[in-house]
Image (spheres, rainbow, N blue to C red):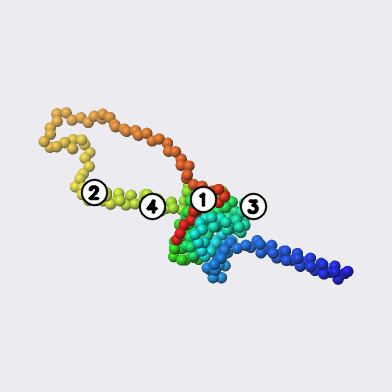
């Protein structure tokens, strides 16, 4: 009887230990899902670490999925089905963002779900894809994944710091270049024009009296300068209506945000 009790206790302890060991395994589901062996071990480890760092503390998982070919399937629907079938996402809302790279089909798409829809606006997703796709076109897979993960990290950090998602109305990253174009270029052109005109008028002198502008052959009996009036033109400027499509995230009937994807 004692031996049976000891064996039962040992079996119970083994089961408890196995359960404890299995919990981290479930929690450590990969964020970089390379299902075609595209990355070597070192590259994969670096990308996975970047994905974990991007997701950490934001309750929004950042995924990069690599598959070979999806045939004629629509890349957005494929990514959505994969997301739901594998139970991806953080928390009860399954919040996350996933970038699908179908190497054999040369297709890509970005989808968001749960809290990821709010964190990643249409404007920001377009920026991310504009930065990533050129690397895909050059078959630089690792750099494409690294750029995607880096921009996702910046996006989630911005959301956490400002309490609002990065969008068209609060993105200041392009302001220095815009100011240079709007102010600098016209000033250069104006300087050139003024320089040319100045070089052609070196003999001109400013007159201080109205009499100075009267020709030598004209004789006036009375010469008086009288102020008469000033012309002023007023133009009505109606108030501008705010656009209703200035930003935010689009959501489909399945609750997913993101892009429609494309080819590279």
The image quadrant that residue 231 belongs to is top left
Q: Secondary structure at mark 1?
A: loop
Q: Relative to residue 184, is residue 224 drawn left or right?
A: left
User: Which is nearer the eye, 216 or 234?
Assistant: 234
User: Which is nearer the eye, 148 or 109?
Assistant: 109
- Mark 2 and mark 4 residues within 8 Å of each other at the beta carbon: no
The image quadrant that residue 263 belongs to is bottom left
Residue corresponding to mark 4: 180
In front of the other: label 1 or label 4? 1
Q: Kindly identify the residue that appears in the image at 48 percent across and 56 percent down.
A: 261
> In the rendered view of the protein, which quadrant contains the N terminus?
bottom right
- What's the distance in space between the residues labelled 2 and 4, CA to CA? 25 Å
Q: Earlier in the sequence, mark 2 or mark 3?
A: 3
Residue 249 % position (x, y): 52, 48
Q: Kindly identify the residue that appears in the image at 56 percent across and 55 percent down.
A: 80
Q: Relative to residue 197, is residue 99 drawn left or right?
A: right
Q: Earlier in the sequence, mark 2 or mark 4?
A: 4
Residue corresponding to mark 2: 197
Circle 2: is it few (<14), some (14-19), or many (20+) Cα within 10 Å? few
Circle 3: is it few (<14), some (14-19), or many (20+) Cα within 10 Å? few
Residue 154 seen anywhere in this rendered image of the structure: no
Looking at this rendering, what residue extends furthest in the right direction?
1
In front of the other: label 4 or label 3? 3
- Mark 3 and mark 1 residues within 8 Å of each other at the beta carbon: no
User: Which is nearer the eye, 71 or 230?
Assistant: 71
Label at residue 121: 1
- What's the distance in space between the residues labelled 2 and 1, CA to CA? 50 Å
- What's the distance in space between the residues labelled 2 and 3, CA to CA? 70 Å
Residue 168 % position (x, y): 47, 48
Q: Is residue 5 above or below residue 179?
A: below
Q: Secondary structure at mark 3?
A: loop
């Amino acid at each position: 009887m004692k031996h049976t009790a000891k064996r039962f206790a040992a079996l119970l302890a083994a089961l408890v230990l196995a359960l404890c060991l299995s919990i981290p395994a479930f929690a450590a589901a990969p964020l970089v899902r390379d299902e075609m062996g595209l990355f070597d071990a070192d590259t994969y480890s670096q990308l996975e670490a970047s994905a974990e760092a991007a997701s950490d503390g934001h309750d929004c998982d950042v995924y990069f999925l690599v598959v070979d070919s999806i045939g004629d399937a629509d890349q957005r629907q494929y990514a959505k089905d994969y997301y739901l079938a594998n139970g991806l996402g953080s928390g009860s809302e399954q919040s996350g963002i996933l970038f699908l790279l179908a190497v054999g089909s040369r297709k890509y798409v970005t989808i968001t779900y749960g809290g990821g829809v709010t964190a990643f606006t249409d404007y920001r997703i377009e920026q991310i894809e504009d930065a990533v796709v050129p690397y895909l076109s050059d078959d630089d897979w690792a750099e494409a994944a690294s750029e995607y993960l880096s921009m996702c990290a910046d996006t989630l950090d911005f959301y956490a710091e400002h309490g609002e998602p990065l969008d068209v109305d609060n993105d200041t990253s392009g302001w220095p270049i815009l100011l240079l174009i709007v102010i600098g270029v016209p000033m250069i052109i104006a300087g050139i024009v003024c320089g040319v005109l100045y070089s052609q008028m070196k003999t001109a002198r400013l007159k201080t009296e109205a009499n100075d502008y009267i020709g030598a052959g004209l004789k006036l009996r009375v010469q008086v300068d009288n102020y008469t009036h000033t012309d002023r033109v007023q133009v009505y400027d109606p108030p501008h209506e705010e656009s209703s499509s200035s930003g935010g995230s689009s959501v489909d009937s399945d609750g997913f945000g993101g892009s429609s994807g494309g080819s590279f």
